[in-house]
Image (cartoon, rainbow, N blue to C red):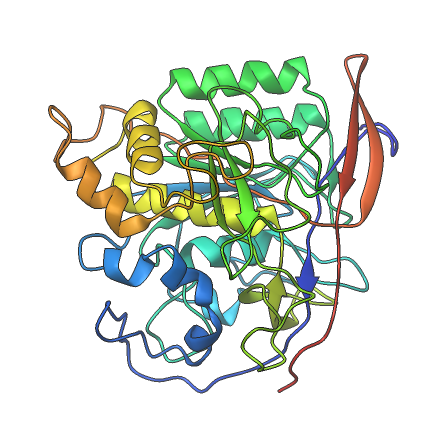
Protein backbone atom coordinates (compact mmCIF):
# COMPACT_ATOMS: atom_id res chain seq x y z
CA UNK A 1 0.00 0.00 0.00
CA UNK A 2 1.33 3.45 -0.88
CA UNK A 3 0.73 6.09 1.75
CA UNK A 4 -1.14 9.32 1.11
CA UNK A 5 1.39 11.87 -0.03
CA UNK A 6 3.13 9.19 -2.07
CA UNK A 7 0.34 8.81 -4.55
CA UNK A 8 -0.49 10.08 -7.98
CA UNK A 9 -3.70 12.07 -8.17
CA UNK A 10 -6.35 12.32 -10.81
CA UNK A 11 -9.26 14.66 -10.92
CA UNK A 12 -12.62 15.55 -12.29
CA UNK A 13 -14.04 18.84 -13.38
CA UNK A 14 -17.69 18.13 -12.77
CA UNK A 15 -20.93 20.03 -12.72
CA UNK A 16 -23.75 18.16 -11.04
CA UNK A 17 -26.94 17.58 -12.97
CA UNK A 18 -29.73 15.11 -12.30
CA UNK A 19 -32.16 14.33 -15.08
CA UNK A 20 -33.93 11.03 -15.48
CA UNK A 21 -35.56 10.30 -18.84
CA UNK A 22 -38.18 7.66 -19.75
CA UNK A 23 -37.21 4.60 -21.74
CA UNK A 24 -38.00 4.37 -25.42
CA UNK A 25 -37.16 2.29 -28.49
CA UNK A 26 -33.60 2.00 -29.77
CA UNK A 27 -32.63 4.57 -32.38
CA UNK A 28 -28.88 5.18 -32.55
CA UNK A 29 -29.11 7.98 -35.10
CA UNK A 30 -26.93 9.36 -37.85
CA UNK A 31 -25.85 12.69 -39.28
CA UNK A 32 -29.35 13.25 -40.65
CA UNK A 33 -31.32 11.82 -37.74
CA UNK A 34 -29.92 12.29 -34.23
CA UNK A 35 -30.35 9.56 -31.61
CA UNK A 36 -33.45 9.67 -29.41
CA UNK A 37 -31.48 10.23 -26.20
CA UNK A 38 -33.14 13.35 -24.70
CA UNK A 39 -29.89 14.94 -23.50
CA UNK A 40 -28.17 14.57 -26.88
CA UNK A 41 -29.13 18.17 -27.67
CA UNK A 42 -26.78 19.31 -24.90
CA UNK A 43 -23.91 17.14 -26.15
CA UNK A 44 -22.36 19.71 -28.43
CA UNK A 45 -19.06 17.86 -28.27
CA UNK A 46 -20.41 14.94 -30.34
CA UNK A 47 -21.25 17.17 -33.26
CA UNK A 48 -17.97 19.06 -32.87
CA UNK A 49 -15.96 15.85 -33.35
CA UNK A 50 -18.25 14.58 -36.19
CA UNK A 51 -19.40 11.55 -34.21
CA UNK A 52 -22.93 11.36 -35.72
CA UNK A 53 -21.47 11.53 -39.23
CA UNK A 54 -18.98 8.80 -38.40
CA UNK A 55 -21.68 6.41 -37.11
CA UNK A 56 -22.73 5.68 -40.69
CA UNK A 57 -19.36 3.91 -41.10
CA UNK A 58 -18.50 2.70 -37.58
CA UNK A 59 -20.00 2.78 -34.10
CA UNK A 60 -17.02 1.10 -32.50
CA UNK A 61 -18.25 -2.50 -32.58
CA UNK A 62 -15.30 -4.86 -32.33
CA UNK A 63 -13.08 -2.40 -30.43
CA UNK A 64 -12.34 -2.64 -26.70
CA UNK A 65 -11.47 0.43 -24.67
CA UNK A 66 -9.76 -0.04 -21.31
CA UNK A 67 -10.81 2.72 -18.91
CA UNK A 68 -8.11 3.06 -16.23
CA UNK A 69 -9.73 5.19 -13.59
CA UNK A 70 -11.74 5.11 -10.36
CA UNK A 71 -13.69 2.12 -11.67
CA UNK A 72 -16.97 1.96 -13.59
CA UNK A 73 -20.58 1.39 -12.46
CA UNK A 74 -20.84 -1.72 -14.64
CA UNK A 75 -22.50 -4.37 -12.45
CA UNK A 76 -25.20 -5.03 -9.85
CA UNK A 77 -23.42 -6.50 -6.83
CA UNK A 78 -24.11 -5.84 -3.18
CA UNK A 79 -24.28 -2.09 -2.69
CA UNK A 80 -23.16 -1.41 -6.25
CA UNK A 81 -25.49 -0.75 -9.17
CA UNK A 82 -24.93 -0.66 -12.91
CA UNK A 83 -25.50 2.81 -14.33
CA UNK A 84 -28.95 2.85 -16.01
CA UNK A 85 -27.49 4.54 -19.09
CA UNK A 86 -24.82 1.85 -19.37
CA UNK A 87 -27.45 -0.91 -19.43
CA UNK A 88 -26.89 -1.62 -23.12
CA UNK A 89 -23.12 -1.03 -23.11
CA UNK A 90 -20.83 -4.01 -23.67
CA UNK A 91 -18.29 -4.88 -20.95
CA UNK A 92 -15.47 -7.39 -20.64
CA UNK A 93 -13.81 -8.40 -17.36
CA UNK A 94 -11.33 -5.97 -15.86
CA UNK A 95 -9.50 -5.79 -12.55
CA UNK A 96 -9.37 -3.69 -9.37
CA UNK A 97 -5.75 -2.86 -8.57
CA UNK A 98 -6.78 -0.78 -5.55
CA UNK A 99 -8.58 -3.54 -3.63
CA UNK A 100 -6.95 -6.42 -5.49
CA UNK A 101 -10.02 -8.22 -6.80
CA UNK A 102 -11.99 -8.85 -9.99
CA UNK A 103 -14.64 -6.18 -9.31
CA UNK A 104 -13.49 -2.72 -10.50
CA UNK A 105 -16.67 -0.99 -9.26
CA UNK A 106 -16.76 2.79 -9.14
CA UNK A 107 -17.49 4.64 -5.93
CA UNK A 108 -17.67 8.44 -5.71
CA UNK A 109 -16.30 10.58 -2.89
CA UNK A 110 -18.82 11.37 -0.09
CA UNK A 111 -19.59 14.78 -1.55
CA UNK A 112 -19.11 14.76 -5.28
CA UNK A 113 -19.34 12.85 -8.51
CA UNK A 114 -17.25 9.93 -9.71
CA UNK A 115 -14.76 10.15 -12.55
CA UNK A 116 -14.48 6.68 -14.07
CA UNK A 117 -18.16 6.10 -14.86
CA UNK A 118 -18.32 9.52 -16.54
CA UNK A 119 -15.31 8.70 -18.72
CA UNK A 120 -16.78 5.33 -19.68
CA UNK A 121 -19.96 7.15 -20.71
CA UNK A 122 -18.06 9.60 -22.89
CA UNK A 123 -16.73 6.62 -24.81
CA UNK A 124 -19.70 4.26 -24.92
CA UNK A 125 -22.82 5.50 -23.10
CA UNK A 126 -25.76 3.37 -24.21
CA UNK A 127 -27.14 5.30 -27.19
CA UNK A 128 -30.50 5.30 -28.91
CA UNK A 129 -32.35 3.91 -25.88
CA UNK A 130 -34.46 7.00 -25.28
CA UNK A 131 -32.69 7.57 -21.96
CA UNK A 132 -30.27 10.30 -20.96
CA UNK A 133 -27.19 10.87 -23.09
CA UNK A 134 -25.21 9.32 -25.95
CA UNK A 135 -21.65 8.04 -26.26
CA UNK A 136 -19.16 8.80 -29.02
CA UNK A 137 -18.48 5.11 -29.82
CA UNK A 138 -21.71 3.53 -28.56
CA UNK A 139 -20.98 -0.03 -29.71
CA UNK A 140 -17.42 -0.18 -28.36
CA UNK A 141 -16.71 -2.54 -25.46
CA UNK A 142 -15.47 -1.17 -22.13
CA UNK A 143 -12.84 -2.92 -19.99
CA UNK A 144 -13.05 -1.33 -16.51
CA UNK A 145 -9.72 -1.19 -14.68
CA UNK A 146 -9.64 0.46 -11.26
CA UNK A 147 -6.32 2.11 -10.43
CA UNK A 148 -7.61 5.11 -8.43
CA UNK A 149 -9.55 5.35 -5.18
CA UNK A 150 -12.67 7.46 -4.55
CA UNK A 151 -10.36 10.38 -3.72
CA UNK A 152 -8.99 10.07 -7.28
CA UNK A 153 -5.45 9.19 -6.20
CA UNK A 154 -3.45 6.10 -6.95
CA UNK A 155 0.11 4.82 -7.04
CA UNK A 156 2.16 4.92 -10.26
CA UNK A 157 2.79 1.20 -9.78
CA UNK A 158 -0.92 0.36 -9.79
CA UNK A 159 -1.49 2.52 -12.86
CA UNK A 160 1.37 0.71 -14.60
CA UNK A 161 -0.12 -2.65 -13.59
CA UNK A 162 -3.44 -1.55 -15.02
CA UNK A 163 -1.85 -0.65 -18.34
CA UNK A 164 -0.07 -3.98 -18.54
CA UNK A 165 -3.32 -5.78 -17.71
CA UNK A 166 -5.07 -3.97 -20.55
CA UNK A 167 -2.31 -4.96 -22.97
CA UNK A 168 -2.36 -8.61 -21.85
CA UNK A 169 -6.14 -8.98 -21.95
CA UNK A 170 -7.03 -7.74 -25.41
CA UNK A 171 -7.83 -4.05 -24.99
CA UNK A 172 -7.62 -2.09 -28.22
CA UNK A 173 -7.65 1.30 -26.57
CA UNK A 174 -6.67 2.34 -23.06
CA UNK A 175 -8.02 5.51 -21.47
CA UNK A 176 -5.73 7.18 -18.95
CA UNK A 177 -7.26 10.20 -17.22
CA UNK A 178 -4.30 10.92 -14.97
CA UNK A 179 -1.68 13.65 -15.12
CA UNK A 180 1.61 14.23 -13.33
CA UNK A 181 4.17 16.99 -13.72
CA UNK A 182 6.99 14.45 -14.05
CA UNK A 183 7.28 10.94 -15.35
CA UNK A 184 7.82 7.75 -13.35
CA UNK A 185 10.07 4.93 -14.63
CA UNK A 186 7.52 2.22 -13.76
CA UNK A 187 4.88 4.01 -15.81
CA UNK A 188 7.22 4.71 -18.72
CA UNK A 189 8.13 1.02 -18.83
CA UNK A 190 4.43 0.09 -18.88
CA UNK A 191 3.81 2.48 -21.78
CA UNK A 192 6.64 0.86 -23.75
CA UNK A 193 5.30 -2.61 -22.94
CA UNK A 194 1.73 -1.82 -23.96
CA UNK A 195 2.84 -0.10 -27.15
CA UNK A 196 4.99 -3.09 -28.07
CA UNK A 197 1.86 -5.24 -27.84
CA UNK A 198 -0.04 -2.97 -30.22
CA UNK A 199 -1.91 -0.88 -27.69
CA UNK A 200 -3.05 2.60 -28.68
CA UNK A 201 -2.46 4.85 -25.68
CA UNK A 202 -4.33 8.13 -25.22
CA UNK A 203 -3.85 10.43 -22.22
CA UNK A 204 -4.93 13.88 -21.12
CA UNK A 205 -2.55 16.83 -21.25
CA UNK A 206 -3.56 17.99 -17.77
CA UNK A 207 -5.58 20.83 -16.32
CA UNK A 208 -3.05 23.27 -14.91
CA UNK A 209 -3.12 25.78 -17.78
CA UNK A 210 0.66 25.55 -18.08
CA UNK A 211 2.89 25.42 -21.13
CA UNK A 212 4.01 21.83 -20.75
CA UNK A 213 2.11 18.58 -21.22
CA UNK A 214 1.72 16.30 -18.19
CA UNK A 215 2.81 12.68 -17.93
CA UNK A 216 2.10 10.06 -19.21
CA UNK A 217 0.69 12.18 -22.05
CA UNK A 218 4.15 13.65 -22.68
CA UNK A 219 5.67 10.27 -23.55
CA UNK A 220 6.28 10.18 -27.33
CA UNK A 221 4.29 6.98 -27.92
CA UNK A 222 1.20 8.31 -26.15
CA UNK A 223 -1.42 10.39 -27.98
CA UNK A 224 -1.66 13.52 -25.83
CA UNK A 225 -4.93 15.45 -25.79
CA UNK A 226 -5.75 19.00 -24.71
CA UNK A 227 -9.16 20.63 -24.40
CA UNK A 228 -11.01 23.38 -26.25
CA UNK A 229 -14.16 25.29 -25.36
CA UNK A 230 -17.27 25.33 -27.51
CA UNK A 231 -15.91 28.22 -29.58
CA UNK A 232 -12.85 26.17 -30.55
CA UNK A 233 -10.34 28.11 -28.49
CA UNK A 234 -8.02 26.49 -25.97
CA UNK A 235 -9.73 26.01 -22.62
CA UNK A 236 -7.99 28.14 -20.00
CA UNK A 237 -7.18 25.11 -17.82
CA UNK A 238 -5.77 22.97 -20.63
CA UNK A 239 -2.03 22.31 -20.62
CA UNK A 240 -0.21 22.83 -23.92
CA UNK A 241 3.25 22.59 -25.41
CA UNK A 242 5.36 20.92 -28.08
CA UNK A 243 4.32 17.42 -26.90
CA UNK A 244 0.61 18.08 -27.51
CA UNK A 245 -0.84 15.95 -30.32
CA UNK A 246 -4.54 16.84 -30.52
CA UNK A 247 -7.35 18.74 -28.87
CA UNK A 248 -10.99 17.78 -28.35
CA UNK A 249 -13.99 19.45 -26.71
CA UNK A 250 -13.56 19.80 -22.97
CA UNK A 251 -15.68 22.87 -22.41
CA UNK A 252 -15.57 25.60 -19.81
CA UNK A 253 -17.92 25.26 -16.85
CA UNK A 254 -17.84 29.01 -16.33
CA UNK A 255 -19.61 29.56 -19.67
CA UNK A 256 -23.19 28.87 -20.76
CA UNK A 257 -23.30 29.72 -24.47
CA UNK A 258 -26.54 27.80 -25.02
CA UNK A 259 -28.42 29.78 -22.39
CA UNK A 260 -29.83 26.53 -21.00
CA UNK A 261 -28.00 26.85 -17.67
CA UNK A 262 -26.36 23.56 -18.52
CA UNK A 263 -22.83 24.89 -18.66
CA UNK A 264 -20.22 24.45 -21.38
CA UNK A 265 -19.08 20.96 -20.41
CA UNK A 266 -19.33 17.34 -21.49
CA UNK A 267 -22.50 15.71 -20.17
CA UNK A 268 -22.70 12.00 -19.28
CA UNK A 269 -24.18 9.83 -16.53
CA UNK A 270 -22.10 9.11 -13.45
CA UNK A 271 -22.35 8.40 -9.74
CA UNK A 272 -23.03 11.10 -7.17
CA UNK A 273 -22.83 10.67 -3.41
CA UNK A 274 -22.91 6.87 -3.33
CA UNK A 275 -22.35 3.65 -5.33
CA UNK A 276 -26.00 3.44 -6.46
CA UNK A 277 -27.03 7.08 -6.94
CA UNK A 278 -26.69 8.54 -10.40
CA UNK A 279 -26.76 11.93 -12.07
CA UNK A 280 -26.17 13.42 -15.50
CA UNK A 281 -23.15 15.61 -14.89
CA UNK A 282 -21.04 18.06 -16.83
CA UNK A 283 -17.29 17.61 -16.91
CA UNK A 284 -15.08 20.41 -18.19
CA UNK A 285 -11.57 19.02 -18.47
CA UNK A 286 -8.90 17.41 -20.58
CA UNK A 287 -10.17 14.10 -19.15
CA UNK A 288 -13.32 14.29 -21.22
CA UNK A 289 -11.32 15.49 -24.25
CA UNK A 290 -9.00 12.49 -24.06
CA UNK A 291 -11.95 10.10 -23.74
CA UNK A 292 -13.40 11.55 -26.95
CA UNK A 293 -10.17 10.84 -28.79
CA UNK A 294 -10.17 7.31 -27.38
CA UNK A 295 -13.71 6.91 -28.70
CA UNK A 296 -12.68 8.07 -32.18
CA UNK A 297 -9.79 5.59 -32.02
CA UNK A 298 -12.39 2.92 -31.24
CA UNK A 299 -14.38 3.94 -34.32
CA UNK A 300 -11.22 3.50 -36.41
CA UNK A 301 -10.32 0.14 -34.90
CA UNK A 302 -13.90 -1.10 -35.18
CA UNK A 303 -14.02 -0.13 -38.84
CA UNK A 304 -10.89 -2.16 -39.57
CA UNK A 305 -9.46 0.79 -41.49
CA UNK A 306 -6.75 1.49 -38.90
CA UNK A 307 -5.80 -0.84 -36.03
CA UNK A 308 -2.08 -0.48 -35.29
CA UNK A 309 -0.94 2.44 -33.09
CA UNK A 310 0.98 4.07 -35.95
CA UNK A 311 -2.04 3.78 -38.27
CA UNK A 312 -4.47 5.22 -35.75
CA UNK A 313 -2.14 8.07 -34.81
CA UNK A 314 -1.62 8.95 -38.46
CA UNK A 315 -5.35 8.93 -39.24
CA UNK A 316 -6.20 11.05 -36.20
CA UNK A 317 -3.51 13.69 -36.69
CA UNK A 318 -3.65 14.01 -40.46
CA UNK A 319 -7.45 14.50 -40.47
CA UNK A 320 -7.68 16.92 -37.52
CA UNK A 321 -9.33 20.31 -37.94
CA UNK A 322 -6.56 22.90 -37.92
CA UNK A 323 -6.95 25.50 -35.17
CA UNK A 324 -4.81 28.48 -34.23
CA UNK A 325 -1.80 29.27 -36.43
CA UNK A 326 -1.64 27.32 -39.68
CA UNK A 327 -0.17 23.87 -39.16
CA UNK A 328 0.82 22.16 -35.95
CA UNK A 329 1.27 24.47 -32.97
CA UNK A 330 1.82 24.17 -29.19
CA UNK A 331 -1.72 25.19 -28.17
CA UNK A 332 -3.70 22.86 -30.43
CA UNK A 333 -1.22 20.28 -31.68
CA UNK A 334 -2.39 18.98 -35.05
CA UNK A 335 -5.88 20.34 -34.33
CA UNK A 336 -9.30 19.15 -33.16
CA UNK A 337 -10.08 15.46 -33.65
CA UNK A 338 -12.62 14.74 -36.43
CA UNK A 339 -14.18 11.28 -36.46
CA UNK A 340 -15.68 11.18 -39.96
CA UNK A 341 -12.58 12.72 -41.52
CA UNK A 342 -10.33 10.23 -39.71
CA UNK A 343 -12.35 7.31 -41.06
CA UNK A 344 -12.22 8.76 -44.59
CA UNK A 345 -8.48 9.37 -44.32
CA UNK A 346 -7.80 5.84 -43.07
CA UNK A 347 -9.82 4.38 -45.94
CA UNK A 348 -7.51 6.02 -48.47
CA UNK A 349 -4.10 5.39 -46.96
CA UNK A 350 -2.15 3.07 -49.29
CA UNK A 351 -1.58 -0.33 -47.74
CA UNK A 352 -3.90 0.42 -44.84
CA UNK A 353 -7.52 -0.62 -44.48
CA UNK A 354 -9.74 -2.23 -44.65
CA UNK A 355 -7.48 -4.60 -42.73
CA UNK A 356 -7.94 -7.58 -40.48
CA UNK A 357 -7.09 -7.45 -36.82
CA UNK A 358 -3.78 -8.74 -35.60
CA UNK A 359 -3.52 -12.19 -34.03
CA UNK A 360 -4.01 -10.83 -30.50
CA UNK A 361 -7.58 -10.00 -29.65
CA UNK A 362 -6.83 -6.29 -29.61
CA UNK A 363 -4.52 -3.43 -28.73
CA UNK A 364 -5.32 -0.73 -26.19
CA UNK A 365 -5.86 3.00 -26.33
CA UNK A 366 -5.26 5.43 -23.57
CA UNK A 367 -7.76 8.09 -22.80
CA UNK A 368 -8.04 10.36 -20.07
CA UNK A 369 -8.24 13.60 -18.47
CA UNK A 370 -8.49 14.91 -15.05
CA UNK A 371 -9.92 17.95 -13.53
CA UNK A 372 -9.95 18.17 -9.84
CA UNK A 373 -8.71 20.78 -7.51
CA UNK A 374 -5.98 18.58 -6.16
CA UNK A 375 -2.37 19.50 -5.65
CA UNK A 376 -0.08 16.71 -4.60
CA UNK A 377 3.41 15.29 -4.72
CA UNK A 378 4.03 11.76 -5.86
CA UNK A 379 7.14 9.84 -5.01
CA UNK A 380 7.56 6.91 -7.37
CA UNK A 381 10.83 5.07 -6.96
CA UNK A 382 12.38 8.24 -5.59
CA UNK A 383 10.97 10.35 -8.42
CA UNK A 384 8.85 13.31 -7.43
CA UNK A 385 5.80 13.96 -9.56
CA UNK A 386 4.02 17.27 -9.00
CA UNK A 387 0.32 17.39 -9.62
CA UNK A 388 -2.11 20.21 -9.93
CA UNK A 389 -5.54 19.54 -11.32
CA UNK A 390 -8.54 21.79 -11.59
CA UNK A 391 -11.97 21.06 -10.22
CA UNK A 392 -15.13 23.13 -10.38
CA UNK A 393 -18.53 21.86 -9.31
CA UNK A 394 -21.90 23.47 -9.95
CA UNK A 395 -25.44 22.11 -10.01
CA UNK A 396 -27.26 22.75 -13.24
CA UNK A 397 -30.47 20.81 -13.50
CA UNK A 398 -32.52 18.68 -11.11
CA UNK A 399 -35.02 16.03 -12.08
Q: What residue sits 69% from the left and 26% below the top?
A: 156
Relative to 394, residue 46 above or below: above
Where residue 24 sits: x, y (%)?
A: 34, 84
Q: In this view, does 98 lie to the left or right of 266?
A: right
Q: Residue at x 75, y 60 (%)?
A: 392
- Above or below, 189 against 35 in this view is above
Identified at 61% across, 66% down, the residue is 282
Residue nearest the viewer, comparing 340 with 364: 340
**Quarter-wise, where is residue 204 in the image?**
top right
Exactly how many numbered labels are in the figure? Answer: 0
Q: Quadrant of the N terminus?
A: top right
Q: Is residue 158 visible?
A: yes
The structure residue drawn at horizontal position 51% and vertical position 24%, both measured from the top left corner, is 164
- Asked which quadrant contains residue 53, the reply is bottom left
Q: Is residue 394 left or right of residue 69?
A: right
Residue 203 shown left or right of residue 239 in the figure:
left
Residue 14 horizontal/vertical position (percent): 68, 61
The C terminus - image quarter: bottom right
Residue 120 percent coordinates (x, y):
50, 53
| Residue 233 percent location from the top left of the image | 54, 52
Given residues 258 and 346, the one toward you in this image is 258
Is 172 above or below relative to 104? above
Amino acid sequence: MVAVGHRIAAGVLLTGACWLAPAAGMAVGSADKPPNDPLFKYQWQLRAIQAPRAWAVSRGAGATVAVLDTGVAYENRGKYRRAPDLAGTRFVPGWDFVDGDAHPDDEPPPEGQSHGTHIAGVVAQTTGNGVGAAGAAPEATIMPIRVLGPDTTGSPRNIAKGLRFAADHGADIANLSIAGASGAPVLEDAVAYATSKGVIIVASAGNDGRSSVSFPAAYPKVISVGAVSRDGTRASYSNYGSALDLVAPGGDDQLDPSGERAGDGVMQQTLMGGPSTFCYCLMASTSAAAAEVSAVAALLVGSGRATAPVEVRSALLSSAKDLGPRGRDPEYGAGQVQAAAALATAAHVPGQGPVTKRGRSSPATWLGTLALSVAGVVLAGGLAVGLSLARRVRRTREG
